[in-house]
Image (cartoon, rainbow, N blue to C red):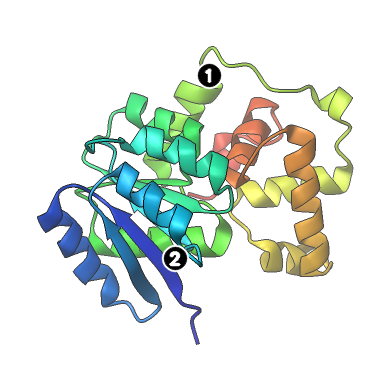
Amino acid sequence: MSTTINIVLADDEVLFRKGISFLLQRETNFNIVFEANDGQELVDYLKSAKTLPDIVITDLKMPNLNGVETTKILHAEFPELKVIALTSYNTPSFISNMIQVGAVSYIVKNASPEEVVLTINEVANKGFYYNEEVMKVIYKDIISGKQTPKSDLDSMQLTSREIEILKLICKQYNAVEIAETLSISPRTAEGHRNNLLLKTQTKNIAGLVVYAIQNNIITLNEIDL
């Protein structure tokens, strides 16, 4: 039996938001717990909510508080919350901006219903999901741009096991799959993942992927898209 994924939608285009809500509610494991008209309404809801949702799906262009600023706030105040951008903007600058402020996935509004459902399930299961187009933006605009790696591998002293696990994370393996591949327990796999976040000074799995490519631990061609 699939675990229920609780979702909050934020989009000022009511007709579109209702359409997405209707589409997602058809999935037996999806539960829409709240719909916000803008980022500020979303933040206010989350601050008062007794239980946080698993995933927030937000548009970029909204009144009062746009998607980028909203994502910054959510990433700082609710770091475990997974934010998916769902927007009509598909230019590299918008994609890279949302990734850098903490979005764990990016969907363009002309995506198929199947792609939207797949993305949500992948994010819930593995922590992030970027399709081929988005991964190319990560590589080109974030890694090949002016940004430099946060730290040096020699000084960080990643163990061979941590590098092994980091490569599997980049290939979108979850803790259970990593445990099975390396013959360790899921709890041990989670422990290594948390240590990697601390050592690399990254805040989420997407950050680990960027770090791994920046430091030549893995290439874009090795990542499962």
Of the two numbered discs 1 and 2 in the rendering, the one whose residue sits closer to the viewer: 2
Badge 1 crowding class, 10 Å Cα cut-off, few under 14, some 14 to 19, many 20 or more, is few
Where residue 189 sits: x, y (%)?
Answer: 78, 60
Figure check: 147 above or below 97: above
Task: Judge whether 137 appears above or below 16 on screen.
Answer: above
Would you say residue 135 is visible in this rendering?
no
**196 horizontally vs 208: left or right:** right
Q: Could you say which is closer to the camera, residue 109 or residue 46?
A: 46
164 vs 183: above or below: above
Q: Position of residue 25 (x, y in %)?
A: 27, 74
Q: What's the amino acid at mark 2?
A: Asn
Q: Which badge, 1 or 2, comes first in the chain's sequence?
A: 2
Identify the residue shown where x is 83% and y is 62%.
Answer: 188
Cα–Cα gap, marks 1 and 2: 30 Å
Residue for badge 2: 121
SS at mark 2 in the image: helix
In the image, taking residue 146 as reference, residue 166 lies left or right, namely right
Q: Position of residue 197 (x, y in %)?
A: 73, 42
Q: Position of residue 74 (x, y in %)?
A: 48, 44
For image coordinates 48% across by 46% down, the residue present is 104
Question: From what the image shows, is residue 54 above or below residue 138?
Answer: below
Q: Residue at x 44, y 33 (%)?
A: 136
Residue type pointed to by label 1? Ser
Left or right of 76? Residue 118 is left
Left or right, 111 with reference to 181: left
- Labelled disc at residue 144: 1
Can residue 31 be seen at all in this image of the molecule? yes
Q: Residue 152 lies in what quarter of the image?
A: top right
